[in-house]
Image: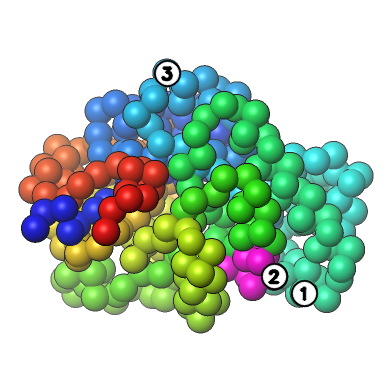
Amino acid sequence: MQDRIRLVVTADDFGLSREVNEAVEEAHRDGILTAASLMVSAPAAADAVARARRMPSLRVGLHLVMVEAWPTLPPEMLPDLVGPDGLIRSDMGRLGLDLARSGSARRQLAAEIAAQFEAFRDTGLPLDHVNAHKHFHVHPVIAGLVLRIGRDHGMRAIRVPREPRAVLRAAEPGANPRLALDSAPWAALLAVRARAAGLLVPDRTLGLAWSGAMTPARVAGLLRHLPDGLTELYTHPATGGGFPGEAPGYAYAAERDALIAPETIAAATKSGAARGGFSDFLAAP
């Protein structure tokens, strides 16, 4: 049956820049994008919220920022987490170790996570889902904080970054996709903990190995090989580069093109997948 295939197409970093926001709006209005993940304290967050309010069919979630970006709380309240530039530290490995060892760092992060949930609540937008910048929520300590704090803020769905390489090879024959994460066991643990908490999680998340290189051909190929169950396909679209916080080497415009290309739209339609945000599938079997 066609409704056995369910698909959420997400854009991360909503609010990072006007270029990102423009691409999100274009891809939702004219393409296959169904959801976006909002960075509540990024430079163009207010513009993103205004666009989302004009597009009530766009499902919006919270893109938690816990590494290498703008905090919501004042930097002086986060001395263990924020660097001299006022941004959350970029040394992800060391930061993860500090969070495991330091109660002070964990308390600061808990306060920052709560502040980001509260900032999202203040937008008035329904909370569709939660994920994290650079998938840092797979860290077991961070996962515990997100699950606890999210429960109190209406979180009902969360990304689990697990990607089957068989789907990638089917989409691009001859491909030898790298492992996108070296934390697959932690992602599996996150799935168990999230489901135990009653949250909806995707059966798979596409976009990890080819992050920043989700071209029209790749996205169309993935859509032609969607397995049964709930799939999240996530991207990083923008109308151009050159904005603060952009990831080096990311083909932002190509990822925008992938969401509006005729071949992609045709593949999504032919798949027969039911499409929407996570909240649209909460009652699905």
Q: Nearer the viewer, residue 139 or 280?
A: 280
Which mark, by number, is residue 100?
1
> Whole-percent x and y of residue 276?
30, 42
> Whole-percent x and y of residue 84?
87, 49
Contact? badges 1 and 2 (CB < 8 Å): yes
> Whole-percent x and y of residue 218?
24, 56
Instruction: Determine which residue is flagged by label 2.
Output: 141
Q: Amino acid at mark 2?
A: Val
Number of residues whose C-alpha sits closer than 10 Å to that of mark 3, classed few (under 14), some (14–19) or many (20 or more): few
Which mark, by number, is residue 54?
3
Tell me which residue sits at (62%, 52%) in the image. 150
149 up-or-down from 20: above or below: below
Compared across the picture, whether 200 is left or right of 138 comes to left
Q: Amino acid at mark 1?
A: Ala
Give the residues drawn in magenta, as a range.
138-144
Q: CA distance from mark 1 to mark 2?
A: 6 Å
Tell me which residue sits at (71%, 50%) in the image. 113
Q: Is residue 230 visible?
A: yes
> Whole-percent x and y of residue 91?
72, 64
Disc 2, SS? helix
Q: Nearer the viewer, residue 138 or 150?
A: 150
